[in-house]
Amino acid sequence: MKSAKSALRSVRPSTGPRRVWIAVLPFVVVILTLGALYAGVAGRLPDPLATHFGGDRADGFSSAQDHLAGCLAVLLVFGVGSGLLVRLRVHTPEVPWLIAASYATAAVLGCSMCLTLLANVDVTDASAVREPQWQTLVSLGVALPAGALGRLLAGAAPPPPRRARGETPRLDLPAGTTAGWSRTISSPPLVALGVVLLGAGLLVGILAGWLSSAGLLLGGAAVLPLASVRVTVDRQGLSLSPTFLPYRCRFRRIPLDRVAEAGSRRIACFAEFGGWGYRIRAGGSGLVLRSGEGIVVRLTNGKEFVVTVDDAATAVALLNTYTDRARARQGG
């Protein structure tokens, strides 16, 4: 009998369009199931329905048609959103797990919506409808096998291409000579967003009180430092420093002893990472402020760190040279 791991490997990796349809499929199934259930019990439902519960007691009501329309709208939004997300990241290692999450989400939503309809069947007074706590446990329990099914159907993600040692460039730097490399990378949209958030926070704070503006101010303070960054390679390794803060305020530093090897390639911001900013994904992380040339550092723990920046090839060559020197000093 094959193990679960063997079963996953035996599934043929899905192509891009096929994976998008696989991600959308559970929401289509839930919509059809919910529609069929509603058609079967429509004549036995009260008007209005109990549609929201505080604890196990009904505290929200709506007509059957409004409830059905709302459920379908939620399912459509999640379904389309899941399809778009998978489409954007179709060639990344985390796509199978995004599809698994899509199946689990559809299962939780569908189970909850169907159980709510069934709880209202043959009830004359909607305020008397109860939602036992075990129904929540059932919804969560259904999510586990649904997620496993989605992961199985998604197939195995192709591993990211790795260069063999020696294929990446080195800088012809004479022994005993040191050099440094530094470039600044900025994202005008993120800079604008940070300024708008801070400005709105100050305005709301003056007009309505600082407690009301705390979220806006914190958002601006979180966005601006990562909107413009100085990337530096020197004999200490790779470091990233926000240009809007003092030079010594580094938010990420990778010393030479953590670098296995570095390379450069074109990075698709949305297709690979789903957007701008500091991104974390399966197998690594990175600061991506635009699409284009970037540094890809393979770390000694097997993960990758990516940063988009101009003249990445020079930075990579220098970083590999310093890494070789450090390894030689250690006798590695």
Image (cartoon, grey):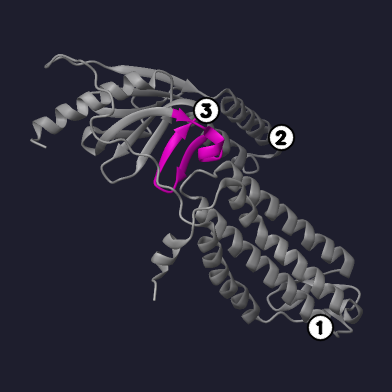
In the image, taking residue 175 as reference, residue 71 lies left or right, namely: right
Instruction: Find residue 10 and report its horizontal and vertical position in percent.
Output: 44, 62
User: Which of the 4 quarters of the picture holds residue 315?
Assistant: top left
Residue 128: which disc? 1
Mark 1 vs mark 3, foreground winner is: 3
Comes first in the chain, label 3 or label 2: 2
Badge 2: how crowded within 10 Å, few (<14), some, or many (20+)? Answer: few
Which is nearer the eye, 205 or 324?
324
Circle 2 SS class:
helix
Instruction: Find residue 285 and report its horizontal and vertical position in percent.
Output: 42, 41
Mark 2 vs mark 1, foreground winner is: 1
Mark 3 is on which residue type? Ser
- Residues under numbered marks 1 and 3 in contact, where contact means CB atoms less than 8 Å apart: no
Residue 297: in magenta span: no
Q: Can residue 249 be seen here?
A: no
Which is nearer the eye, 162 or 140?
162
- Residues under numbered marks 3 and 2 in contact, where contact means CB atoms less than 8 Å apart: no
Image quarter in which the C terminus is found: top left
Circle 3 SS class:
loop
Which is nearer the eye, 273 or 168?
168
Residues rendered magenta in the picture: 266-290
Residue identified by numbered label 3 = 291
Mark 1 is on which residue type? Ala
Mark 3–mark 2 Cα distance, whole angstroms, equals 39 Å
User: Which of the 4 quarters of the picture holds residue 5?
Assistant: bottom left
Residue identified by numbered label 2 = 207
